[in-house]
Image: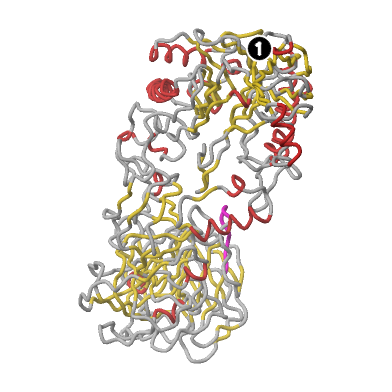
Amino acid sequence: MLGLTVGALAAGGLVLAPAASAAPSPDVVISEVYGGGGNAGAPYANDFIELYNPTSAPVSLSGWAVQYASATGTSWSVTSLSGSIPANGHYLVQEAAGANTAAPALPAPDATGTLALSATAGKVALTTDSTKLTDRGLGAASVKDFVGFGTTANAYEGSGPAPAPSNGTSIARTGGDLDQNATDFATGAPGPQNTGTPTPPDGGTDPGPLTCDTTPVSIGSVQGPGATSPVAGSTVTVAGTVVGDLQEGGFGGVFVQDGGDQNTATSDGIFVFGGTLPALVPGDAVVVRGKVTEYNGLTELGSPTAVTCGHPGLPAATTLPLPSSDADREALEGMLVAPAEDLTVTEVYDLNRYGEIQLAQGGRLITPTEEVAPGPEATAQVAANAARSILFDDGSTANVSSNPPFLTVDDPVRVGDTAHLEPVVLSYGFDSWLLEPADGTAEGTTFAATNPRPEAPQAVGGDLRIADFNVLNYFVDFPSEFGDDARGATNAAELAQQQTKIVNALVELDADVITLHEIENSAVLTPDTPYRAVETLIAALENADGHDWDYVRAHEDTDVITNAIIYRTDRVTTVGGPRIPSDAQLAAFSNARTPIAQTFRAGDEVFSVIANHLKSKGSSCGTGNDDPSVGGAGNCNGARVAQATVLRDFAATVAQESGDPDVLLTGDFNSYRYEPPLDVLRDAGFQEVWTPGEYSYVFDGGSGSLDHVFATSSMYPKITGHTIWDINAVESFAYEYDGAESLYAPYPYRASDHNPTVVGLRTQVAASASISNPQPFRGDKVTVTGTGFTPGKSVTATLPAQNNRVVGTAIAGPDGTVTISFTVPVLLPQGSYPVVLTAADGEKATTSFSLYPVLQETWLRLIGWLGGKH
């Protein structure tokens, strides 16, 4: 019953004065209102109105209704009710859905309507019939209960409206109905309850004054053994110690932990959100009363009241097991925990957004298909990675892009570093387990630089260096003129910062030929100057290193980014013009970047380089083309396989047309090491050039390589080394040219999101020879093997001791290897005999064999001392 009389109209609002008695209403009331359903950040897809029956008998709602009007409106909408509301139970009315239909659904509603409630202000009435209210809705005999909420509501019970909720919060009763909307309701996480919601445990519904002597229930009984509280929607009283203070920074609450209920399946901690809390710090003892809710998977007490009862200090932290399952972690939700060992930083992507760092037990995570082929093993590795990892948060919900925590210009937090955590509380939100700092600041957490910044790439040997670098949308044109087609810097100042970082990285690479990716395709944006972007970059590079550079003049029109090849003119010269695949082959690259090939000469060495950038995993290519399986190759795997197949054939054409079989494939293949597109190349005989434990990319917490180098079998022996320069992928994008302004520096670190690759090449490879048996018997058959010869050249074996008698001839294979077998002449005396291999182009190599004295050889044959050897 309302128990109210109509009072004066004040400040534009219809004010209701309470009747003489202020006792709680003994009738069905509106217990919760939520209007943010389906909005941005909403925990549920629909609005709802919840009713509560405080009596000891069920109440029929047949013919009743809930009605809604805007905060200042006079037009009411109706949802009819049916059935009954149980004694001491709830009744849930689901209303309209918002745009975000992917948000979680409400519990099964007892009634359904289409009322579109405001998230922040409005009027809701419970009526005993379905006749629409008029005016502001008050005074009608049918009104059983009434709630005005939000500062603009022009009608309400008592002295003022209930506080304004939001997309993420509702208004819910803090206790009984005293006909005072302003104090009867508080904001908190929505906790919808239907007629099937169980009643709270004994001791949890004490409506009396809250004191340090109030009898609590155990937090374990509130948490229950599963992900959802068995008493969600009930008001309970708990007692414990504050183990996490997150009242500032947007979380708006504290974590409270009690002494435990000896049930290892239930957590002894809980988050207390919103309401009016006293000044609290970690270590305070408190008694708290609040409504049990579930918010984004975290069990909470909403709309709480609390009293402080001393300061016993923090309890001992419980060991957080890693690896661990969701069930293991659920049993520790809201508790003070400590990992059993220092954890490794495995992802910093969200550090510059939400202050989050992904940590892992046992070292950084590796992308499954970097180590195994897609399939059951990779699927198992996904689960293993999840069990080993957890997020560490800075204790704030704020976007920290302008001032990220833990970072300074010269002291980053990098993937591979080691975290030393201060006391933390295990929380849950947005589908992730999080470690929150007990003091809400994370100021005591430190990171040891166990993966320090490398000043320069590792040595790769050889006398020529070839590098590969994805330059992350290097554009010299801006969105102000070209809209979304200009994907890089937004103005000249940003471009100057981006270019400086890229150029300084290129200088340190100290390469002679460099393949580039994600550079502006000026042929699309500014057709009259089709190479403007690469020319701008080369000019800056020449100014920085003092060398003369040129670029391969090949372009395509399939995308606004392109591949490019640049080279030092004092180190290599081009042989012929650039090549691209045929028109028929290019059909496979309609959603990717066209491969560009160029043949070079360095001294007497001729080789070709093909720059590649296959289709990314970022968007779908459709059913049958994607591999969406857990641990699979991702979107557009089929497209990348088709592109790799074209690349295989194109490389063969390049080798044939250049007259030299040495071909190097470089670039962003958008495939991890054991994914099908790279199998196409390996199956075709290409040799992978790689270094175990080095990775070019970090995504979703996993390290792996999307960027690769493959060599034909003839070129592979000439490669002297390979390294990935770990300057980009492991660092926060706060260090990028358009990251946090306070962290910008011209150094090469985070010049891109991909790490660059360098290989060494030996252009002057001397031929060599070896013999199968350096001490044969006369008449034995021996085999001479030569390496380093020009593939396809004829090679002759001669014996100088017999007037250069030819003992065999063969053609050098694709890898420059030749084998020739012959019989040792029986008339040769004791001594050492050279065997000379001579190629048609003059290349030579020598090996030798030795013969025993005739009598000794005869004796050895007779007694068979070395018969097994000969």
Q: In this view, does 147 lie to the left or right of 407?
A: right
The residue sitting at the bottom extreme is 56
Q: Which image quadrant for residue 444?
A: bottom left
Please state which of residues 312 and 755 is positioned toward the viewer in this rendering. Answer: 755
Give the percent coordinates (x, y) of residue 777. 73, 30
Q: Which colour scheme is used?
A: secondary structure
Quarter of the image with the C terminus is top right
In the image, residue 239 lies at what x, y percent? 32, 80
How many numbered badges does the structure rendering display?
A: 1
Answer yes or no: is residue 596 visible: no
Q: Quadrant of the N terminus?
A: bottom left
Q: Can residue 128 be seen in this view?
A: yes
Q: Residues within 10 Å of mark 1 (few under 14, many from 20)?
A: some
Going 30% across and 51% down the picture, which residue do you hit? 446
Q: Mark 1 points at which residue?
A: 843
Residue 55, above or below 437:
below
Magenta highlight on residue 98:
yes
Relative to 768, is 425 on the left or the right? left
**Residue 278: image location, x then y, percent:** 24, 70
Give the quadrant of residue 152: bottom left
**Residue 542, position in %: x, y?**
42, 11
Q: What stretch is highlighted in magenta?
A: 94-101
Residue 125, placed above or below residue 525: below
SS assignment at label 1: loop
Q: Which amino acid does label 1 sit on?
A: Glu
Farthest residue to the left: give it: 310
Q: Which residue is drawn at 60% across and 63% down?
A: 114
Asked if the magenta segment contains residue 83, the reply would be no
Residue at 71 percent across and 20 percent down: it is 829
